[in-house]
Image: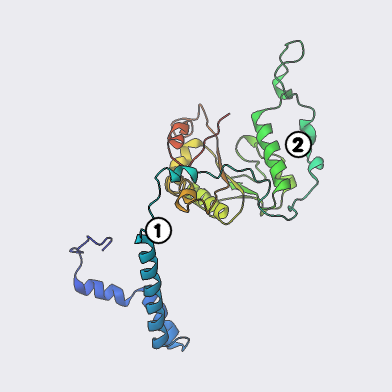
Amino acid sequence: GHSPSDASSYRTKEEISAWQENDCIKGYEDYLKKNKIITSGKVDALKQEVTLRITKALKLAVSLEISPRINPDFMETVMFSNRYKDRMEQRTPEVLIPKEDNPRIRSLTHKFRFALDENGKTYPKVKVFTYRDALFEAMLYRFYEDPTMVAYGEENRDWDGAFAVYRGLTDALPYHRLFNTPISEGAIVGSGAGYALCGGRVVVELMYSDFIGRAGDELFNQVSKWQSMSAGLLTMPLTIRVSVGNKYGAQHSQDWTSLVAHIPGLKVMFP
């Protein structure tokens, strides 16, 4: 059954035996034997080795001398790395053009970074440096510093991402560093967590905050917990960027910031 307390009363012994005969691991074992890649003796030896390894690991885990119980407050110290790391690897980042030749970077030099001029007069909105400009500028800088950094999500490349935040990145980056994904929030966040655990820096985008629910397990049980569950041995250099909409109806205008902020292991940054 699914747990030690499950008596499997809903299955007959005949059904269990039938499925055991069709088990993929047993099928693979039979295939290797049939093709003389492995012998029955070797299979038995491997099974014994696995049993011994698991038994040893369990003995180490339950031993109060070898694995003494730690103070519960320890979890707090490994929940976040809280470190600044300029780059995850020491190699030259792959880019398509020099940063200063980026058309959007050039256009931003003509924008004002304050709302008011020296006389207190409001600058025209089209001439003011915006949040989307700040996001673009910060991400572009990191792309040129960290060779491992990638960004992806729905319509991130060519279409420029939600609300044109990524406009100008397509000109600067090869496809494997900025690319589009299928409409699958769970896959987007889950793969981002995997890439981060493997040592890369990643920014994934969910087009609207409403779609966080589609990646609930990946966000609340994987992204939030791997660092503390590994006692700080693993890090999670992952940013999940979402937009909070308005006037787009019940499925595109929610703000789930408070829900995410409630989960230990996640940080929420909101302008």
**Residue 239 place in picture, x, y as percent:** 57, 43
Label 2 neighbour load within 10 Å: few <14, some 14-19, many 20+: some
Label 1 neighbour load within 10 Å: few <14, some 14-19, many 20+: few
On the image, numbered disc 1 is attached to which residue?
67
**Residue 132 place in picture, x, y as percent:** 65, 32
User: Measuring 40% from the left and 46% from the top, which residue is drawn there?
Assistant: 71
User: Measuring 65% from the left and 41% from the top, which residue is drawn there?
Assistant: 160
Image disc number at residue 89: none
On the image, numbered disc 2 is attached to which residue?
104
Ranked by sequence position, the earlier of labels 1 and 2 is: 1
User: Compared to 162, does 222 lie above or below?
Assistant: below
Q: Amino acid at mark 2?
A: Arg
User: Measuring 51% from the left and 38% from the top, which residue is drawn there?
Assistant: 267
User: Measuring 36% from the left and 58% from the top, which residue is drawn there?
Assistant: 64
**Residue 52 place in picture, x, y as percent:** 38, 74
**Residue 137 place in picture, x, y as percent:** 71, 37
Count of numbered circles in the view: 2
Front residue of 30 and 253: 30
Quadrant where the C terminus sits is top right
Classify mark 2: helix, strand or loop.
Answer: helix
Q: Residue furthest front?
A: 65
The answer to whether residue 91 is left or right of residue 75 is: right
Classify mark 1: helix, strand or loop.
Answer: loop
Q: Based on the displayed image, in which of its 4 quarters is residue 116 positioned?
A: top right
Q: Amino acid at mark 1?
A: Ser
Quadrant where the N terminus sits is bottom left
User: Compared to 14, does 100 lie above or below?
Assistant: above
Question: Could you tell me how far apart the alpha carbons at marks 1 and 2 are, in whole angstroms?
Answer: 55 Å
Q: Residue furthest top?
A: 119
The answer to whether residue 2 is left or right of residue 51 is: left
